[in-house]
Amino acid sequence: MLRVSQLLALGSAVLPLIHAQTLTVDGVLVPANESTVAPAAEIITGDLLHEETVQLTDTIISNLTDLSLTNISLFDFASNTTLENGSLPECKTYPGTALWPDKLIWKLLDLLTGGALIETVPIGAACYDDSGHYDEARCSYILTQWYNSTLHYQDPTSVMSPLYQGLTCMPQYNETGECTLGGFPSYVIKATNVAQIQLAVNFARNLNIRLVVKNTGHDFNGRSSGAGSLSVWTHHLKSIKFYETYETKSYSGPAFKVGTGVQGFELYEAAEKYGVTAVGGEGMTVGYAGGYLAGGGHSPMSPHYGMGADAILSIDLVTPDGRVITADETQNTELFWALRGGGGSTFGVATSYTVKVYPKLPIVSVMTFAFGTNENVTLATFWAAVKAYWELIPTFNDAGNYEYWNIFHTSETGVLFTMAPWFAPNMTTVQLQALTAPLFAKWEELGLHVEPVYSEYNSFHPAWKAGFSQEAIGHWSGKTAARLFPKENFEDPTKFNATFEAIKSVVDKGGQLVGFGITGGPGPYPDNAVNPAWREAAMHVISMLSWADGTSMEEVAILSMKLTNEWMAPWREVSPGSGAYNSEGDVTEPNFQQSFYGKEKYERLYNLKKVVDPTGLFYANLGVGSEDWYVTGQIVGLPTQNGQLCRL
Ligand SMILES: Cc1cc2nc3c(=O)[nH]c(=O)nc-3n(C[C@H](O)[C@H](O)[C@H](O)COP(=O)(O)OP(=O)(O)OC[C@H]3O[C@@H](n4cnc5c(N)ncnc54)[C@H](O)[C@@H]3O)c2cc1C
Ligand SMILES: *[C@@H]1O[C@H](CO)[C@@H](O)[C@H](O)[C@H]1NC(C)=O
Ligand SMILES: *[C@@H]1O[C@H](CO)[C@@H](O)[C@H](O)[C@H]1NC(C)=O
Ligand SMILES: *[C@@H]1O[C@H](CO)[C@@H](O)[C@H](O)[C@H]1NC(C)=O
Ligand SMILES: *[C@@H]1O[C@H](CO)[C@@H](O)[C@H](O)[C@H]1NC(C)=O
Ligand SMILES: *[C@@H]1O[C@H](CO)[C@@H](O)[C@H](O)[C@H]1NC(C)=O
Ligand SMILES: *[C@@H]1O[C@H](CO)[C@@H](O)[C@H](O)[C@H]1NC(C)=O
Ligand SMILES: *[C@@H]1O[C@H](CO)[C@@H](O)[C@H](O)[C@H]1NC(C)=O
Ligand SMILES: *[C@@H]1O[C@H](CO)[C@@H](O)[C@H](O)[C@H]1NC(C)=O
Ligand SMILES: *[C@@H]1O[C@H](CO)[C@@H](O)[C@H](O)[C@H]1NC(C)=O
Ligand SMILES: *[C@@H]1O[C@H](CO)[C@@H](O)[C@H](O)[C@H]1NC(C)=O
């Protein structure tokens, strides 16, 4: 039980805490509940989003002294001493072990965060007889909506690549099996202000509990889940502030300051409203200011304006010590460098980004088409057509176009190419037709007649809406990997032939492709942690290996390694020194430090990680510093977040 050495803030009064369940008010014991315990927060002023005006401060902490069973202060900021000389336990505190906090302590966190704590109920629990949450109608809804991202981003813990959570408590009709938490966090702080995030960070650090950050759950690699963790859910940090002119040492122009829960579609709606163009992803519901910006962020506008992270002017962040800092070109400059490409869940919890925005586009053209093998189109013709397109990629890159294409199997022998869409900012359809005429002529020469559909818009938002639909997510019967192919691979004929054969080989083996004709921008590039491979890139390709439902996890692990070691080897061989995009990469990427971050940048990021997060509060699979950790109980080749996080 808690000792009586504690003070809790109660409105403006200060009361001694006797017990997590009771308080002494004027000598009388009363229940500790939402009306007697005020959230631990103070209102701060400044150029802040309203969520950021509510913060945990030293004053508040001094009114909450020594809230402890032991000598650990549950909610205190990290002191120099705890950071420098705290002994570092081998593993994170895990549910079921003696150090795991009991319900009273969690209740206290709930009270101090103003009722923001949620105990995890896995999304599939509604389908399980004995879960205590069985609900037939809800289960049906979950099953029909499973591939819809909206279902998952509205849930505090659901993730869209469930394989890497550990596939526990998957929804099925009439499920009688056990619904376990698996790789889901134990508790979640539904953050609506920064104080709650600070309390979660301090609580997790002081109690050596694994901390997870979830925004939308779009992550490819399970990085927004983690067994036995406390998760910070940033989805509700939705403010957007527009500056007609935002001034820094090196920039003067329009900008947005966005909360880290803002999603792609919300960013673009705001840009349309204020008459500007923002650099965000293609994915409708993907978080903008979460994993996307942290990982670099590629955009339909990248060939014009560079990566999403290149537009960042300033970042507000809760650091691992629980403090709120601003990182920009004049303060916390090393963090400012690292947070622009160095990956999410590594240096802290970002609470807002201020980003450059660009003038409204006067015109945007969108083109879609598809072709596949059929009675008139042989496989050889199909591949000759694909090759003709890839060969011209640098031309389309230089014109600032962005192409989003797929190649997938339609039958044992059939393959289909879809362009969905070809996106041409600042071009009329007539200009786009002229640009692509040589490609269509080449296809006619090959005997392939392709009829594209064109449309034209007078700004980015309607073109983006027309071009990109809400993508299906949630699959777990496949694994993806990826590679960035440099421009020189398309310009040098020998390299180009080898590149073509390497990429095609994955389809020949039964794989599918999702590709992007895209660049990391025309430059000059700001000095940041964006993977240097992006700066040379002309094409980004994602490969996918699928398996049948019901395949055992042992077999899946073997297939996972097959994709990584066999199928992807030719891709790496033709692009030595290049890399892959960390946010859409292989969960078992070899030499991930070089591939995802670039060798030199990785060293710099790793050194900073040691200074900023000396206790290893933040962890992300294949994130900076992740090589120092492992998750227990894993099958080699199939890393999930279902296990205890321990130091190597
Ligand atoms: C359908 C789809 C379309 C996509 N389209 C694009 C695209 O066009 N361009 C592109 O570049 N990428 C794209 N991606 C990849 C996308 O960038 C990553 O999946 C990204 O990690 C998603 O970030 P999130 O915040 O939405 O997801 P989450 O899964 O919630 O978070 C991803 C990672 O970021 C961390 N994180 C989130 N918020 C914060 C925060 N505030 N502070 C610290 N860490 C945080 C999480 O801990 C996790 O490690 C797409 C993905 C999908 C599934
Ligand atoms: C909280 O405790 C106070 C003081 O005892 C009591 O009056 C109030 O009804 C309680 N509120 C709730 C929601 O339990
Ligand atoms: C902290 O406690 C002091 C009294 O010790 C009180 O005056 C002050 O208002 C409290 N601060 C906050 C932010 O609650
Ligand atoms: C707290 O610290 C004191 C002094 O360092 C020590 O004697 C005591 O054993 C500690 N108590 C616990 C519960 O760790
Ligand atoms: C330790 O804390 C003091 C006072 O807050 C600060 O001045 C000093 O820079 C800190 N040292 C380190 C290594 O963080
Ligand atoms: C931490 O430990 C080192 C080495 O044991 C010692 O020199 C240093 O003074 C300690 N720092 C603090 C703040 O206790
Ligand atoms: C996903 O669900 C949302 C909310 O129910 C709905 O508006 C949207 O149309 C669905 N998307 C798809 C692709 O079905
Ligand atoms: C679930 O079980 C009920 C009762 O046994 C049955 O009526 C129903 O058809 C089953 N649903 C499915 C999808 O199998
Ligand atoms: C193949 O070509 C013939 C002759 O031009 C045409 O009639 C037929 O529709 C074509 N088939 C397909 C699938 O396009
Ligand atoms: C669009 O085209 C116009 C005219 O060619 C040019 O001045 C402008 O810079 C272009 N804008 C972008 C974003 O490329
Ligand atoms: C590339 O492949 C094509 C088709 O196989 C061939 O005609 C051409 O000579 C090759 N180019 C080089 C440089 O090897």
Image: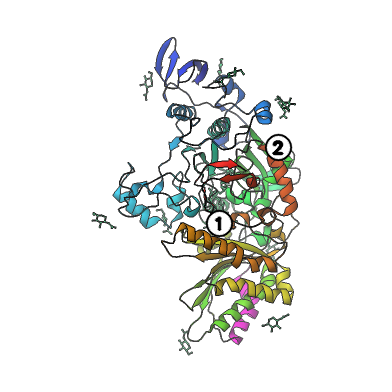
- For the residue with label 1, is its CB less than 8 Å from the closest atom of ligand 1? no
Residue type at the position of mark 2: Val
In this view, the residue in front, 173 or 569, is 569
Q: Answer whether labels 1 and 2 touch (C-beta < 8 Å).
A: no
x and y percent of residue 623 in the render? Answer: 62, 48
Query: Few, some or many C-alpha atoms within 10 Å of disc 1 (few <14, some 14-19, many ≥20)?
Result: some
Residue 429 sits inside the magenta stretch: yes
Residue tagged 1: 637
Q: Residue at x 73, y 61 (%)?
A: 577
Q: Give the range drawn in magenta.
A: 424-448
**Dot 2: what SS?**
helix
Residue tagged 2: 611
Residue 356 sits inside the magenta stretch: no
x and y percent of residue 574 in the render? Answer: 69, 69
Q: Residue 525 appears in which quarter of the rendering?
A: bottom right
**Dot 1: what SS?**
loop
